[in-house]
């Protein structure tokens, strides 16, 4: 099974919030878009929160995030995984992204939200211990996964939980 690699971050100089997923799904990799699965609730939630048209093209949706001080990245830079489920990631094969570099370059990021428990777990296990003490002031919060695999919550419930992001972004 070949290694899969994630995407560059969506980020701008005014980023105050960083949303972290685990690794792009097969559908996302195929489309070369974060949260590219048509049933993933991420883009509908973001568009609702920021009064944006969900029909906008991917480039415009990325711009909408950046205009609102939101950065998006994944915890993993690469891994081996069969299918799209986080539970299928072979932990012995993972490589994490350079968070020290990102946080050094984008000093306004003060809050990190995890898109699901696996992103939070991998960050705590593989990234946090290696981060420099300058980044201890960051605040972290796990939100329910927007993945269609998280069918235990309806989109309305996910949206309600994700509303917390608006408290931390550029007005």
Image (cartoon, rainbow, N blue to C red):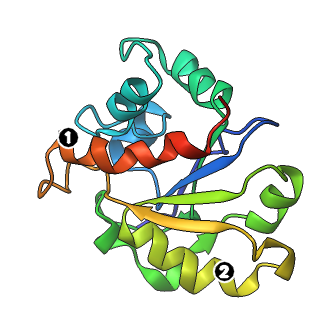
Check disc 1 and report its element: helix, strand or loop: helix
User: How packed is label 1: few (under 14 Cα within 10 Å), some, or many (20 or more)?
Assistant: some
Question: Is 54 placed above or below 86 here?
Answer: above
Residue 45 location, x and y as percent?
Answer: 35, 34
Question: Is 70 placed above or below 147 here?
Answer: above
| Numbered tag placed on residue 155 in the rendering | 1
| Residue name at image x 48 percent, y 34 percent | 33
Q: Is residue 52 left or right of residue 135?
A: left
| Residue name at image x 28 percent, y 62 percent | 85
- Front residue of this view, candidates 24 and 102: 102
Residue 117 location, x and y as percent?
Answer: 37, 70
- Front residue of this view, candidates 171 and 11: 171
| Residue name at image x 50 percent, y 21 percent | 58
Residue 140 location, x and y as percent?
Answer: 56, 68
Q: Is residue 80 visible?
A: no
Q: Is residue 51 left or right of residue 125?
A: left
Q: Nearer the viewer, mark 1 or mark 2?
A: 1
Residue hosting label 2:
128
> How far apart, in angstroms, are the residues tagged by discs 1 and 2?
30 Å
Check disc 2 and report its element: helix, strand or loop: helix
């Amino acid at each position: 099974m070949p290694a899969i690699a994630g995407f560059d971050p969506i980020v701008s100089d005014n980023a105050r919030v960083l949303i972290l997923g685990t690794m792009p799904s097969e559908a996302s990799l195929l489309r070369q878009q974060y949260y590219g699965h048509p049933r993933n609730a991420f883009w509908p939630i973001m568009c609702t929160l920021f009064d944006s048209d969900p029909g906008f093209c991917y480039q415009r949706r990325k711009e909408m995030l950046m205009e609102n001080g939101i950065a998006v990245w994944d915890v993993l830079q690469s891994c081996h995984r069969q299918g799209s489920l986080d539970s299928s990631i072979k932990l012995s094969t993972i490589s994490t992204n350079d968070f020290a570099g990102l946080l050094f370059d984008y000093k306004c990021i003060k809050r990190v939200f995890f898109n699901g428990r696996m992103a939070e777990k991998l960050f705590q296990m593989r990234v946090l211990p290696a981060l420099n003490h300058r980044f201890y002031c960051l605040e972290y919060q796990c939100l329910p996964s927007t993945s269609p695999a998280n069918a235990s919550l309806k989109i309305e419930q996910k949206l309600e939980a994700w509303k917390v992001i608006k408290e931390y972004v550029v007005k």
